[in-house]
Amino acid sequence: MNAVASTLAFVESPVQLLNVLEWAHADAAAAADAVPDPEQVLAGVPRQPERRVVAAGEAGLLPGETAAGDGDGSAAVPPLRIVVLPPTDPMSRGQLRRIAGIARDQGHTVQWQEARGGSGAPFKALASLAGEVRRADRIVVGDPFSRFVQLLLVPARAKELVVVDDGTATMEFLAQLGRGERLRRWHRTGTGTVARIKELVYAPVSGRARRRLTPGPGRRVEVFTSMPVTPLPGMDLRVNDFAWTRSRFGPPRLTKGTDLVGTSLVETGVVDADRYLEAVARLTRVHGATRYFAHRRESPEKLRSLSEATGLEIVRPDLPLELIARRGPIGRTIVSFPSTVVHTLPYALDGTGVKVAVCEIDPSWLTATASSRARGFLAGVADTARDVHRLPSQAAPAAG
């Protein structure tokens, strides 16, 4: 069994599955670049690999620079085995099924594995997957914070681990890994007694997963991301510039209006619901927005209130926004709060003329229960976004 054939990927969200397809494309392009040209070899000048891997401490690429391959889709992509561990919400499951179909069309094997929704589901899934995990030479994961993924890493013997982008969470993952902290989502407080007991019981598994995700002797770790991060010593960092998406979709038809991108910060308890509604209303008036692309985790009640208060057309995408925007039609200006898309859309829409803007989150919008990390994390997401226009929080709701 060769290294490619024994690659096993685990994804839990539509964006993770999209980024596995991007990684497979980039990895195939890098492998093709590394193969010597026969004519050059005969001439005594072996072809030099063109794979673009960012060394530790080096700044990330700007949107439009190619991280791996030339983005024309010409590199043959070896098939992968992808295991989808779907969440329970219908929007995420619908998007995952759509992208799973695309992945199968690309020649990959996709297994739909229920690991939630019942007391016995996680144990059945672990028992079903343990053998494949032990045999895999390379494991690709989309969410290193996932407790289920961490459990799957316990029996793993793979010498290569790849973490594909899970959006802005990738920034926090590398920061926590570098500080030697336990892996914990930035928006979770976990201050209750039950939460602390659960973390204490789970600590051995979490610690082992953290060690597995840290480069070491006989263990290679790669991170594939669009986020501006610094890898740990010995870690490979490959930039995801959405070459696969750009090679297969678009360029999009542009509308004259402005589109807003929604966020689930209200649903995760970070931003106050009334403040968020005020922010969207103000942005709609100031920028003449006509459509609101909802996050897959936004509640129907919240979206109904937004529509009634602003007159915006609420769009619930059936694919990740990077694909929706690339296929079009899309506004000439896209306005978002600090989120993954302010980093990914400039790559996906490179050369289209679309302007991406990010509206900062005012500290007064945060809820009383928001984690202590929330303010600094959201500011960092906005501050590090490349090739986007920054809007101050005053451009949204008035304070007070």
Image: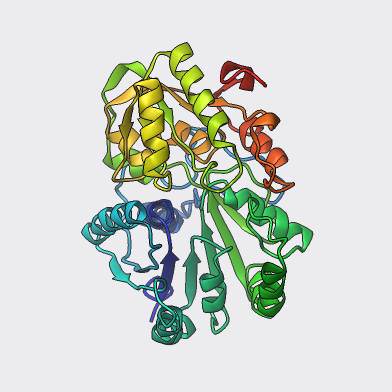
Q: Is residue 185 above or below residue 146?
A: above
Residue 193, given in percent of the width and then of the height, sits at: 72, 69
Residue appearing at x 29%, y 18% in the figure: 255
Indicate left or right for 291 with 48 as reference.
left
Above or below, 66 against 279 in this view is: below
Q: Is residue 104 in view?
A: yes
Residue 335, percent across and down? 47, 25
Q: Which residue occupies 34% across, 38% down?
A: 246
Q: Nearer the viewer, residue 226 or 325?
A: 325
| Residue 216 visible somewhere in the drawing | no
Q: Is residue 395 above or below residue 100?
A: above
Q: Residue at x 38, y 62 (%)?
A: 88
Is residue 118 toward the left or the right of residue 254 in the image?
right
- Location of the N terminus by quadrant is bottom left
* Residue 248 image offset from top left, x and y in percent: 27, 42
Which one is in front, 362 or 149? 362
Which one is in front, 85 or 276?
276
Residue 143, x across and y down, in percent: 52, 61
Q: Is residue 193 left or right of residue 45?
A: right
